[in-house]
Image (cartoon, grey):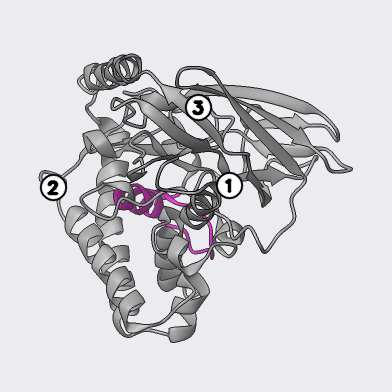
């Protein structure tokens, strides 16, 4: 690249994504290659001594357009504008997982141009950096996560071809947003209650961020500085405003899978570029309205999680598949400030008294 050395780009990638890579060793080896213009193939090898039962939704193994790549041009990082998910962390179906045996190599591929604007063409540096959540062999509940960092490849992209792929992807999204979008019956009731509870949770969390326990701020956001408190309080304030009405606001709410992205284990998702959120069937069948358990999931905190993804609220990420309290604890202060699950877990902690 002309202005950014490979080492500088790698440092930027490591800082921009989910895991503090200096903290943990990993049994995952990920290698990527460009196979056709903007199409990337990743080979993932389990170099450890035991099998890994990894979660597919929201990860590099997901078939939907979640964030799988970090992309840089001479001008800097290319924004991601695809799907943001909230994934269940317990009682998952077996089909939500993939077992990678010790020494086994699997592969997956995706087109970077769908969710990154590469229409300018030319050279782009691409890497895959993130984490895979895992469960024990005899369990379907998430117990931890393992980080990965791929090599960096430089793609020489035909801008016109990349623009065509991106245009087709966005047109398919826009067409689907008008299909069967109304919430009715018990789903309407649950959605309205969740939005109301989201407002109350966000208001309490905003107050706690302003003047609450410094230890609690440090536990979730790795800092209790005045600037961190101000940022967190402002985000929760915007969430409270957005959840303050079911008839106005910056977003649209659906109870049918209009994208679609409701695969096994997915509770809800947001498409920030279109300002809409979707509650999946699992949201209604597997979650209580409100939980009284620390770090458990419910409908209200799931809605709050999704609202933070909206670009008008914060534009939070899922940090390439980082879900649940244990993974949140592995993030840096800067990453926590822009991580959806950190906000939902903090709101839960204030409500429950963790």
Q: Residue furthest left?
A: 248
Which residue: 45% across, 78% down?
A: 223
53 lies left or right of 75 = right
Quick one: label 1, few (<14), some, or many (20+) residues within 10 Å?
Answer: many
Q: Earlier in the sequence, mark 3 or mark 1?
A: 1
Dot 3 crowding, Cα within 10 Å, few <14, some 14–19, many 20+ = many
Q: Is residue 308 left or right of residue 144?
A: left
Please say whether residue 302 is one of the residues in the magenta stretch.
Answer: yes
Residue 66, quarter of the rendered image: top left
Label 3, label 2: how far apart the Cα atoms are: 27 Å
- Please give the residue where the numbered disc 2 appears in the rendered image: 249
Q: What secondary structure is marked by label 1?
A: loop
State which tag comes first along the sequence, 2 or 1. Answer: 1
Q: Position of residue 128 (x, y in %)?
A: 56, 39
In front of the other: 184 or 70: 70
**Mark 2 neighbour class, 10 Å CA radius: few under 14, some 14 to 19, many 20 or more:** few
Label 3 sits on residue: 263
Q: CA distance from mark 2 to mark 1?
A: 29 Å
Range covered by the magenta-colored residues: 288-308
For image coordinates 28% across by 55% down, the residue present is 314
Q: Which residue is mark 1?
A: 89
Q: Are marks 3 and 2 in contact (CB under 8 Å)?
A: no
């Amino acid at each position: 690249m002309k202005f950014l050395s490979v080492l500088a780009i790698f440092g930027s990638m490591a800082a921009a994504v989910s895991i503090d890579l200096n903290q943990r060793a990993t049994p995952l080896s990920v290698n990527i290659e460009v196979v056709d213009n903007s199409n990337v193939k990743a080979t993932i090898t389990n170099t450890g001594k035991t099998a890994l039962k990894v979660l597919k939704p929201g990860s590099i193994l997901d078939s939907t357009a979640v964030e799988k790549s970090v992309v840089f041009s001479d001008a800097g990082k290319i924004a991601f504008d695809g799907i943001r998910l909230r994934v269940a962390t317990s009682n998952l179906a077996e089909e939500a997982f993939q077992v990678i045996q010790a020494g086994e190599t699997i592969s997956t591929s995706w087109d970077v141009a769908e969710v990154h604007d590469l229409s300018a063409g030319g050279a782009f540096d691409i890497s895959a950096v993130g984490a895979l959540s895992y469960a024990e062999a005899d369990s379907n509940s998430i117990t931890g996560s393992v980080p990965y960092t791929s090599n960096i490849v430089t793609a020489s992209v035909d801008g016109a071809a990349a623009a065509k792929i991106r245009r087709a992807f966005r047109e398919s999204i826009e067409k689907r947003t008008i299909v069967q979008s109304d919430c009715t019956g018990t789903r309407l009731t649950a959605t309205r209650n969740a939005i109301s509870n989201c407002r109350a949770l966000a208001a309490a969390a905003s107050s706690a961020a302003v003047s609450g326990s410094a230890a609690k701020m440090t536990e979730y956001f790795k800092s209790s500085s005045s600037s961190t408190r101000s940022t967190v309080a402002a985000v929760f304030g915007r969430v409270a405003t957005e959840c303050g009405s079911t008839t106005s606001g910056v977003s649209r709410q659906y109870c049918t899978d209009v994208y679609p992205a409701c695969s096994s284990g997915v509770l809800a998702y947001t498409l920030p570029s279109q300002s809409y959120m979707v509650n999946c069937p699992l949201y209604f069948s597997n979650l209580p309205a409100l939980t009284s358990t620390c770090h458990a999931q419910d409908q209200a905190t799931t809605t709050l999680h999704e609202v933070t993804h909206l670009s008008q609220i914060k534009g939070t990420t899922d940090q390439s598949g980082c879900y649940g309290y244990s993974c949140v604890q592995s993030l840096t202060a800067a990453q926590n400030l822009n991580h959806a699950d950190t906000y939902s877990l903090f709101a839960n902690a204030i409500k429950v008294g963790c």
